[in-house]
Amino acid sequence: MKKILVLGAGLVARPLVRYLLDLPGVQLTVASRTKAKADAMVAGHADGTTLALDADDGAAMAKLVADHDLAISLLPPRLHTAVAALCVEHRKHMVTTSYSTPAMRDLDGPARAAGVIIVNEVGVDPGLDHMAAMRTIDRIREAGGQVTGFRSYCGGLPAPEANDNPFGYKFSWSPRGVLTAASNDAVYLEDGNRIETPGRELFADFHLLDVEGLGALEAFPNRNSLDYIEVYGLAGVRTMFRGTLRYAGWCDTLKAIVDLGLLSQDPVTYAAGTTYADYTGSFLKNSAGASVRAGVASQLGLAPDAAALDNLEWLGLFESQAIPGAGQATTALDVLSERMLETMPFRPGERDLLVQVHTFDAEYPDGRRQRTTATMIDYGQPDGDSSMARTVGLPAAIATRLVIEDRIDSPGLHVPVTRQFYQPILDELEGHDIGFSESTEDLSA
């Protein structure tokens, strides 16, 4: 009997938990700050137990890790390295969906020495993107081709019928993570040129991508794409771009939010009675005699009827409604995050979708030049699991099964870019109706 520990019971955990409970020979423990959430997922299953856990309680965490064969961390990313260190110390395996960090990579050597397998980046983005990319890259190489250009796009969005607000976006949990990512610098290659985009200019650097069934989506760069040239074995590639997808209008609106300063994380205490108009107006350098909307337009150099202004007005940022939590320490970012969560939630019965598009430009020894496009669009289940939960949780669950079945042949830190990971995971996901369609066009002419 294999004992698996799931740390965290957030919105992406349920598909993973239910998958693992269906495996024979597995005892599952779900530990969460809110035990009731874990109870709802386990739902009295004979092979599942739940408990309350303060993730910052090092002694409790160490005992839990020591008592299990493998730990899956769905905790906030800041906690993953501490969990991984405990796994190495107690010779237990680990799986997480989050990006690998330098601190995590420092554990590769100790993990190898301890015979411990640590799998990072095995969700959807990162995760499915790596696996779909490497499956096609390996196939191109096996046919004698060389990849000269690679573009990878991913977006979690409302399904078209639920896309009914001017932002083209909705939230199931705090928008804070989406908003803080809006400050990330980005680096990528475009036709041999290194492009560096500072976080403050991220939403000015977008292009349109036409996706069948969804129309023209906005694509902006995601972090450092160059990190994956070595990971994917693409030495000599001339274009390397990883991007995020949103419905049209997102980038101009987020650029206005960034330029205005609404993503500031500086501590601030707003006086009692402060309104959203006061909050927004506090970022204006000179608004004497002008409405807040007019002041924002003037400061940002926007036309008075700009769609970005309409979107900020729709969000209520020019209104006389009092902000919540006035008189308490907060940040401008948190005020905005709470407002977005209040006005842009998924409603009961609405579906989300997850879209990934990967394009591969390849050259072959006989002179052929081809572009292969792989596309996945997955929809959530109304009042059931979201697509985000399925596409994050199921790859991690399948990777966990591979580890406990001894199908991963080497210890140390892994990202799922090798065939031993991507082939079984992608094959099994197709049985869950999560898969890619491919098309190839000739670029030789």
Image: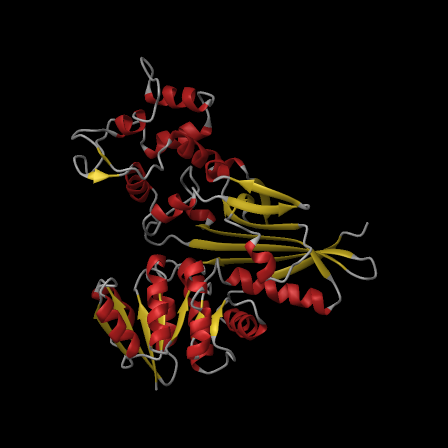
Instruction: Farthest residue to the top: give it.
Output: 289
Which residue is more in the foreground, 433 or 176? 176
Quadrant of the frame with the N terminus: bottom left
Residue occupying image coordinates x 28% and y 79% = 67
Task: Residue at 23% x, 30% y: name it.
Answer: 321
On screen, residue 170 versus residue 246, left or right, reads: left
Quick check: 365 left or right of 260? right
Quarter location, residue 278? top left
State the colouring used for the structure image: secondary structure
Quarter of the figure with residue 356 = bottom right
Residue 8 percent location from the top left of the image: 30, 64
Tell me: 307 left or right of 346: right
421 is higher (above) or lower (below) than 3: above
- Number of numbered discs: 0
Q: Position of residue 142 (x, y in %)?
A: 71, 69
Vertical comparison of 340 with 421: above or below: above
Would you say residue 43 is visible in this rendering? Answer: no
Vertical arrangement, residue 53 with respect to residue 212, above or below: below
Q: Percent x, y for residue 105?
A: 46, 64
Considering depth in this image, is 175 or 227 the residue closer to the camera? 227
The answer to whether one can see residue 382 in this image is yes
Q: Nearer the viewer, residue 110 or 154?
A: 110
Q: What residue appears at the point 46 percent right and 71 percent down from the top-left corner?
A: 109
